[in-house]
């Protein structure tokens, strides 16, 4: 007998980050799977006053609430199970060195308290990567499910086969906000080391714009794109450049792999969990820009290697980071939580 679809309330803050992407992709995936997601957006300003969200009523007929950790506690409603997904565990020891002083104070005095309340309120807690799940389990000593983030591998897919003109520059794509922990500070140095045979194209992130003053001639800024336009950007490039120093989950790496691009980046947390060095990517030790440049030169000199890495990346994205796999995992989690509530109700 076919189980009925679930009505899932997805309250979310527009944060200008991958969390926004997650919420939209989850809503679309649940809809395709026959459920009724209700994605409700709130202003980013509620990050500093989440308690005001307690007065928001859940949509009539809601079966379950699914929210992010910073505001999850504020969406706990009587009689409705709450699933909390931790997107960026700010206590992760690999993340701590990348926090700015004021950010550290903000996290310790405010966000940590919100997260603790959300974890306690949650009927199920989910991490988006295994290294994040392990860190949370160590700190809070409570069950943590792990469900990787994903991409729609039909939308993010390789374009028609093309052969790069060996006389043309190798085009590397950086996607993200221009922050240090995303590795934006190494881009100019890398561009100078590579020289005119290479171009680094920087797609503006959701939050901030790049300061292009003193950029070398082979660095370029691309205007922000809607999610629907991202696959075309990847297909127009030769290599995905992912020099992030910390990532809970490597969204950019997975999107690039799904589009058949080889990845060059640092061997760090979420990137290393998503990519396989030598198989889908060439990863350098953290902050080793010289090796990063060597990897880019290697791909420029060996198109067959670039093609092999891209094809293997595509296979890995489809097998491990596809939409159907992740949405099915969330559906199983929802059913488990609802069944547990029915038994204890």
Image: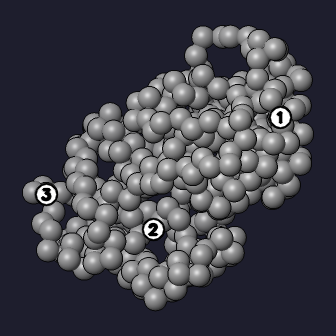
For the point 65% across and 62% down, the residue is 181
Q: CA distance from mark 3 to mark 2?
A: 22 Å
Q: Is residue 184 above or below residue 303?
A: below
Q: Dots 3 and 2: beta carbons under 8 Å? A: no
Say whether residue 125 is left or right of residue 65: right
- Horizontally, residue 291 falls left or right of residue 324, namely right
Quadrant position of residue 4? top left
**In terms of image quadrants, where is residue 52?**
bottom left
Task: Let me know if residue 94 appears in the view.
Answer: yes
* Image position, residue 78 (x, y; %): 18, 75
Q: Is residue 315 at least partly visible in the picture? A: no
The residue beneath circle 2 is 125
Query: Which residue is painted at 33% across and 57% down in the image?
Result: 14
Spatial CA span between label 1 and label 2: 47 Å
Q: Which residue is mark 3?
A: 59
Quadrant (top left, top right, bottom left, bottom right) of the C terminus: bottom left
Q: CA distance from mark 1 to mark 3?
A: 56 Å
Picture coordinates of residue 339 (x, y %)?
32, 62
The mark found on residue 52 in the picture is none
Question: In this rendering, which labeled residue sits more in front, label 3 or label 2?
Answer: 3
Q: Is residue 108 above or below residue 226?
A: below
Question: Is disc 3 surrounded by few (<14), some (14 to 19) or many (20+) residues within 10 Å?
Answer: few
Reading the image, the residue beneath label 1 is: 195
- Left or right position of 256 against 21: right
Q: Nearer the viewer, mark 1 or mark 3?
A: 1
């Amino acid at each position: 007998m076919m189980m009925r679809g679930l009505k899932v309330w997805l309250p979310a803050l527009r944060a200008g980050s991958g969390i926004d992407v997650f919420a939209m992709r989850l809503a679309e995936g649940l809809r395709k799977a026959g459920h009724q997601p209700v994605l409700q957006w709130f202003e980013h300003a509620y990050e500093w006053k989440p308690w005001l969200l307690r007065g928001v009523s859940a949509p009539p007929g809601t079966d379950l609430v699914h929210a992010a950790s910073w505001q999850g506690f504020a969406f706990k409603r009587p009689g409705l199970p709450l699933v909390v997904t931790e997107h960026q565990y700010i206590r992760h020891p690999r993340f701590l060195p990348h926090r700015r002083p004021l950010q550290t104070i903000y996290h310790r005095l405010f966000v940590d308290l919100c997260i603790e309340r959300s974890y306690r309120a949650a009927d199920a807690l989910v991490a988006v990567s295994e290294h994040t799940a392990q860190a949370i389990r160590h700190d809070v000593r409570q069950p943590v499910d792990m469900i990787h983030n994903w991409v729609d591998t039909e939308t993010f897919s390789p374009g028609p086969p093309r052969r790069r003109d060996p006389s043309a520059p190798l085009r590397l794509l950086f996607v993200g906000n221009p922050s240090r922990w995303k590795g934006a500070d190494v881009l100019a140095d890398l561009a100078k080391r590579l020289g005119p045979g290479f171009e680094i194209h920087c797609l503006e992130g959701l939050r901030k714009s790049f300061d292009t003053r003193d950029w070398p001639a082979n660095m370029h800024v691309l205007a922000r794109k809607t999610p629907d336009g991202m696959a075309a950007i990847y297909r127009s490039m030769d290599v995905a450049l992912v020099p992030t120093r910390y990532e809970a989950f490597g969204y950019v790496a997975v999107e690039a792999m799904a589009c058949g691009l080889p990845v060059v980046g640092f061997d760090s947390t979420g990137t290393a969990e998503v990519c396989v060095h030598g198989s889908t990517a060439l990863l350098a030790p953290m902050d080793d820009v010289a090796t990063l440049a060597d990897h880019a030169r290697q791909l420029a000199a060996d198109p067959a290697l670039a093609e092999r890495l891209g094809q293997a990346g595509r296979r890995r994205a489809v097998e491990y980071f596809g939409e159907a796999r992740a949405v099915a995992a969330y559906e199983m989690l929802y059913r488990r939580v609802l069944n547990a509530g029915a038994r204890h109700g």
